[in-house]
Image (cartoon, rainbow, N blue to C red):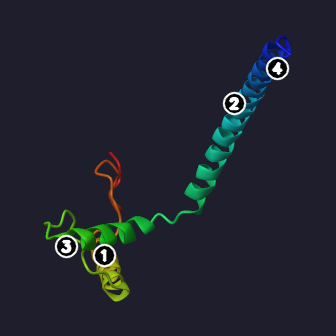
Amino acid sequence: MDILIPLSNELRYVRAQIGYEVTEQASDFEMEAADHWGRIHLRFEKWLKDPDDIYLRVEEREEVRRKKGLAPRVIILPWSNEEEEKVIAAQRSEARKKRKRNPRNVSPKAPEKGVKPA
């Protein structure tokens, strides 16, 4: 009986060491897999995300700041589709007016019509 207790302890110690080594290797494998699939997941989320979502997050953040009594960091201008269309139409009409004033670009070195070169 006196010899069985130390042998049992040694057996349990070796068994614990084996379990530790196995779980350490499994942990390393899982960490590498998590890193790999994490990068793929981030790439998918970036592809899925709408670039205009930032405006919604800014509005939410500014609302939180307002409720806390803090000064706004960003001023969000009101937007409407009609106003944007008016701005685009004004830009187009201005471009047309400029083209009417200068119907074509004439090079100063180009000979004028009706004038014979010397």
Rendered image: mark on residue 91:
1
Of mark 3 and mark 2, the one earlier in the sequence is 2
Give how far apart the Cα atoms at labels 2 and 4 are. Answer: 30 Å
Give how far apart the Cα atoms at labels 3 and 1 are. Answer: 36 Å
Amino acid type at image mark 2: Asp
Hey, which quadrant is residue 72 in on the image? bottom left
Give the number of the mark in front: 2 or 4: 4
Place of residue 11 in the rendered image (x, y in percent of width and height, measured from the top left):
82, 19
Give how far apart the Cα atoms at labels 4 and 3 are. Answer: 68 Å
Place of residue 36 in the rendered image (x, y in percent of width and height, measured from the top left):
67, 40
Amino acid type at image mark 1: Gln
**Residue in the foreground of this view, choosing between 99 and 32:** 32
Q: Going by the image, does 43 lie left or right of 107?
A: right
SS category of the residue bearing label 3: helix
Give how far apart the Cα atoms at labels 4 and 1 are. Answer: 89 Å
Place of residue 92 in the rendered image (x, y in percent of width and height, measured from the top left):
34, 77
Give how far apart the Cα atoms at labels 1 and 2 are. Answer: 60 Å
Look at mark 3 in the image and give the residue it sits on.
66
- Residue 46, placed above or below residue 109: below
SS category of the residue bearing label 2: helix
Q: Going by the image, does 59 lie left or right of 37?
A: left
**Residue in the foreground of this view, choosing between 12 and 68:** 12
Look at mark 2 in the image and give the residue it sits on.
28
SS category of the residue bearing label 1: helix
From where the camera sits, is residue 52 visible?
no
Disc tally is 4
CB-based contact (under 8 Å), mark 1 and mark 2: no
Of mark 1 and mark 2, the one earlier in the sequence is 2
Q: Residue at x 40, y 64 (%)?
A: 54
Look at mark 4 in the image and give the residue it sits on.
8
Of mark 2 and mark 4, the one earlier in the sequence is 4
